[in-house]
Image (cartoon, rainbow, N blue to C red):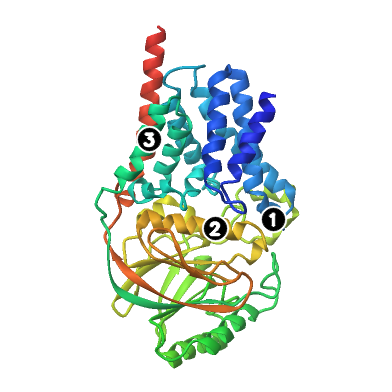
Amino acid sequence: MTNLLAILFGLLTSFAFEPVALWPFALIGFSGLFWLLNKNYLTQRLLSAYLFGLTFLLTVQHWTSTYVGSIPWLILGFMQATFFILPALFFKRNHRYNQIVFALSVVLVELALRTIPFTGFGWSRVGFTQVDSPIAVLYPLGGAVLVTFYIGLISASRSLISFLLLILVLPVSLIIPPTVSFNQPVKIALVQGGVVNLGLDFNAIAKELFNRHLDQSINSIELNSVDLIIWPENSVDVDIGRNSDVLKKVIDFSRQTNTPLLISGVQKNNEGKLNQAFLFDPQLKQIYTKRYLTPFGEYIPLRSIAEKVSKYTSQVSDISAGTSDTILNIQSSKFQTLICYELIDDSLIRKVEHDFLVIQTNNATFGDTPQLDQQVNIARVRAAETSRYIPYVSTTGVTSFIGPKGEFISQVEKFEPATLFGQIEKAKGLTYAQKYGMYIEMIAIIWLLTLLLMRRRGRS
């Protein structure tokens, strides 16, 4: 029965993510996990924690199996589930410190998820589930890490007084003065050109994606109507350095609209194969190279072994990572762009310090799965963490304008070619999460080790 409950609580926690996306389930699931760990001895705790993590991860990340088969999905889930045994290891049955131990250890679970192995896969963090809840007030104060800690703490409340005191933290947080201000509007057009085929062969027809985005732009954007036009990741599906006709059309369009144009594509040069964003105004002005690459998606670690596990591995050619941030400039604005998977890297988010943040992504590879909505939800969290507007543009959806509290301002239908026009405001300043959020995990480790040492001394 205990094992079945662990599976149930893992499943309930997954309901906090898309496609269900009901934030209270994160608290319900974690409350159940704490109850199981608190009342059982070590062996059962380890098994319960593992089954909880396995069920949770396999459910949330099932979309990873859509086009590459079940084996990579299962390997990822079974491997990452081992991180969930951390709370079980640190618990002592019915101990008074278990509440704080639980909150601290789930922070470490998510630290492991986003860093191990290789560059980690920190997609399924409960800290990403609260953007529509009252807990969202904590995002600019400590980021997703603080939200995870709070969820762990309140889920493990053992008395009404403890629960009410933690609830009181939320309105008190609103008293803390904001550190980011806004001024000067910027008009932006986001172009969702769509694709012919969903899946790994979304770009099977050369220049098809480019032509779709160019045609959509020409048909919808007038001269001087916006300050910036943005296309999504892989919107130019050929190497612009080797296709002069495509390069000329991009320059001509930017000139004809008298508007800077930010596009994205893969280019080969002496450094290798690079996933890049290109800013034209109207000539090529700046280039940003993606730094945080997707393991097994943009490069293959342990390739010789991976090719024996999945036949799809041979279809992935390694992309080289960029090494520096690029501050993009248009008229009187400065902004940064992140490409797809980069938005789950906390360290990159902390460095977002200019007027606004652009997210360019290509979701065609994952078809009509919860991945699309899960990713735009993470972007909403990043907007709340940085108190910045985010123009979020995808080949297939969900192309959106996101406000500085993580709210949707506007969006277009998935899979339909469309141009989304919006006006955002330039931000100035850094949030507390950006300034100090990096220390929360370090504090959690030190605090947890201190508690364990105190417990050991008390036992001796």
Is 319 on the left or on the right of 310, as rendered?
Answer: left
Q: Position of residue 326 (x, y in %)?
A: 37, 67
Q: Residue at x 42, y 18 (%)?
A: 96
**Element type where label 1 sits in the image:** helix
Q: Mark 3: which amino acid?
A: Leu
Q: Which residue is mark 2?
A: 375
Tell me, yes or no, whether the two marked residues, 2 and 1, touch with CB atoms within 8 Å. Answer: no
Q: Mark 2: which amino acid?
A: Gln
The answer to which of marks 1 and 3 sits earlier in the sequence is: 3
Q: Which residue is mark 1?
A: 313
Residue 385 appears anywhere in the view? yes
The answer to which of marks 2 and 1 sits earlier in the sequence is: 1
Quadrant where the N terminus sits is top right
Q: Which mark is residue 166?
A: 3
Figure check: 61 above or below 253: above
Cα separation, mark 3 vs mark 2, equals: 29 Å
Cα separation, mark 1 vs mark 3, equals: 47 Å
Between tags 1 and 3, which lies in front? 3
Cα separation, mark 2 vs mark 1, equals: 23 Å
Q: Residues within 10 Å of mark 3 (few under 14, many from 20)?
A: some
Residue 305 appears anywhere in the view? no
**Element type where label 3 sits in the image:** helix
